[in-house]
Amino acid sequence: MSSSELCNYPAIKAHLLLDLMVIRLEYPTPYHPEYQQIIATVLFLREQGVTVQRKHGVEVSKPITTHPKAAITGATVPLLPEGRFTVSYGCIKKKCYAWFKFNPTKLGKAGMNFMATYIGHSMMEKGASTLLDRGLASHLEIAVDIDGVEFDDHCFLDPTLRSEQAFWLEGGTLYLGSKLRYLSIYDKRRELKKKSGVDLGHPRLRIEHVANDGRKYPCEGLEELSNPFSSLIVVRRQELISGPFDVHLSGLRGRIKAKSCSLPIAYYSLKPAERKIALVGLPTSPRS
């Protein structure tokens, strides 16, 4: 998956990021030496109080995940001011697991090296390479930042993701898909300014692919993943609404203007045959 495949504007600078991932290891028995070492490390960290976080002024322990039929215990390991990682363990349906959750982008090279050293010294005899050799990625967030592209100037559609959440559209955010697999598209410049007061000084469009659908991806083969943005259509709003007459787009334009709705809502309000016609006329069509 190359950067040239990620957006429909090859002259615009784009950055591919592995924004968040959860790696899962499975153990045949709770008495496995490595699993026991993970438990010992997590309990030690919890005793030291590193898992304590504040929410609405109340100190709470925040595990990595929960399951109605299992007790999941986790601890957060602070690495550097920029980042941290979480390690958790627990049994689900008589199987024992350990989860490692981290954000490679926030940790950076120094943080990732520190994490690998910590895991190797405290939990795994063979070091952090165990995560890559045996681990399965159970949650992935892959993002692309596209500089110079304004969120408000564009419309977005992925014909493979049926549902959408346009409630936050005016605030600069659009969700395409379901909670198991979706695209989060938003104004990154606006988000940074709101959260930290930092102004990038130029537009930045963030598109995030989130996979939380139960599929497990071998860590050693992540670089072979197919392009998760290949079916995304990015259309300049002005071209879509007020462009030259196109018989293929007449139905789609009529729905958008009449209902003042987003592109996905207008698209799925069309009949199946009309959708195929509309895809032909869109300025940017999905690639095979």
Image (cartoon, rainbow, N blue to C red):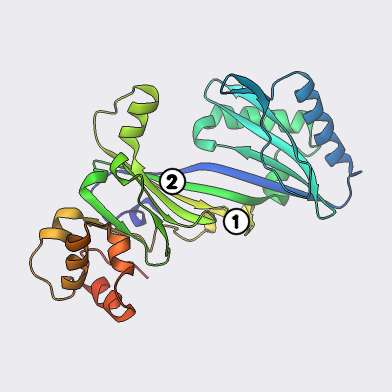
Q: Quadrant of the C terminus?
A: bottom left
| Mark in front: 2 vs 1 | 2
2 left or right, relative to 74: left
Q: Earlier in the sequence, mark 2 or mark 1?
A: 2
Task: Using the image as rendered, state which of residue 120 and residue 88 is in the foreground.
Answer: 88
Looking at the rendered structure, the kind of residue marked 1 is Gly
Q: Secondary structure at mark 2?
A: strand
The answer to whether residue 1 of the structure is visible from this angle is no
Task: Using the image as rendered, state which of residue 80 and residue 272 is in the foreground.
Answer: 272
133 left or right, relative to 171: right
| Residue at point 51%, 57% (across, down) | 181
Above or below for 153 versus 272: above
Whole-percent x and y of residue 67? 72, 47
* Label 2, label 1: how far apart the Cα atoms are: 18 Å
Q: Residue furthest left?
A: 244
| Residue at point 88%, 45% (across, down) | 30
Above or below for 17 versus 235: above
Whole-percent x and y of residue 86? 66, 33
| Residue at point 63%, 58% (across, down) | 214
